[in-house]
Image (tube, grey):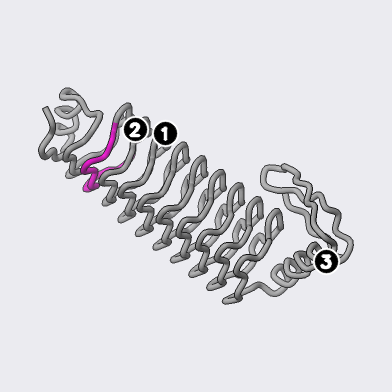
Amino acid sequence: MPQFWGTLTSFPPRIGGIGGRNKLHRVSPGKFDHKWRLVAEIASSGAVGRDLRGADLSDTDLSNTKLSGANLCDADLSGADLSGADLSGADLIRPKLSDADLSGANLIRANLIAANLSGANLSGANLIGANLSGANLIGANLSGANLIGANLIGANLIGANLRGAELSATNLSDSNLSGVNLSGAFLNPMRVSGANLSGTNLSGANLSGANLNGADLTRAQLRDAKVKNARFAYILGIDESTKLELIKRGAIFYNFPA
């Protein structure tokens, strides 16, 4: 976990990141001191609505801090501990959040366009209405996250874990969900038109009323998935026997290719 020292001018350069990893920082003393003065301010007083564009907050402990409405565009938060932090309504366009811990964080209506969240821990995070279009979520942990009404158009979620996530009214159109674990997720209604769902685990997922038009379901696991009124048109990777089985369970197929 990230470490925090009380003396602002005596920080050793080895700061722990998520998962206990260590990273050696080679920076000038002045830049180093500035970084940790800023961290101390945020940790003690929060940064509600503050302009933190381009700030270096990598590998820091900002857990449970108040950052609602802050401007963190292009900031480096890679490896930071933001668990339980309030980032509601924050601007996080193009930030570095790889391997960050955002478990249980409040990201309601946060703007995360093109954010790098690869390997990040977002388990149990509240992302209602968040904009994650074009975000990199490769290998991210979103288990149990609340993504109601979130925008994930064009997001890359290869290998992500969305087990038990709430995805009602979430827009995943044209996103890459290859190899994603969506078992037990609630996806009613959800738009995944044109999405790559190849190899995705949808076992037990609630797809009732979902729009899957044009999706690639090659090798997808649909065992015990609820598909009543789910719409399938121009689907790839669904054979005739699977189609008939899904229809028996209430799925609606249009223009199924021969």
Q: Nearer the viewer, mark 2 or mark 3?
A: 3
Kindly identify the residue that appears in the image at 71 percent across and 67 percent down: 43
What label sits on residue 198 in the rendered view?
Answer: 2
Instruction: Point out the tag, 2 or 3, that comes first from the N-terminus.
Output: 3
| In the displayed structure image, the side of residue 107 where residue 45 appears, left or right | right
Q: Quadrant of residue 231?
A: top left
Query: Which residue type carries mark 1?
Result: Gly
What label sits on residue 179 in the rendered view?
Answer: 1
Quadrant showing the C terminus: top left
Kindly identify the residue that appears in the image at 80 percent across and 62 percent down: 32
Instruction: Point out the tag, 1 or 3, that comes first from the N-terminus.
Output: 3
- Residues at badges 1 and 2 in contact (C-beta under 8 Å)? yes
Percent position (x, y) of residue 125? 51, 55
Question: In the image, which residues are magenta?
Answer: 202-217
Does 217 appear above or below 156?
Answer: above
Q: Nearer the viewer, mark 1 or mark 3?
A: 3
Disc 3 marks which residue?
30
Which secondary structure type mostly characterizes the magenta part of the structure? loop
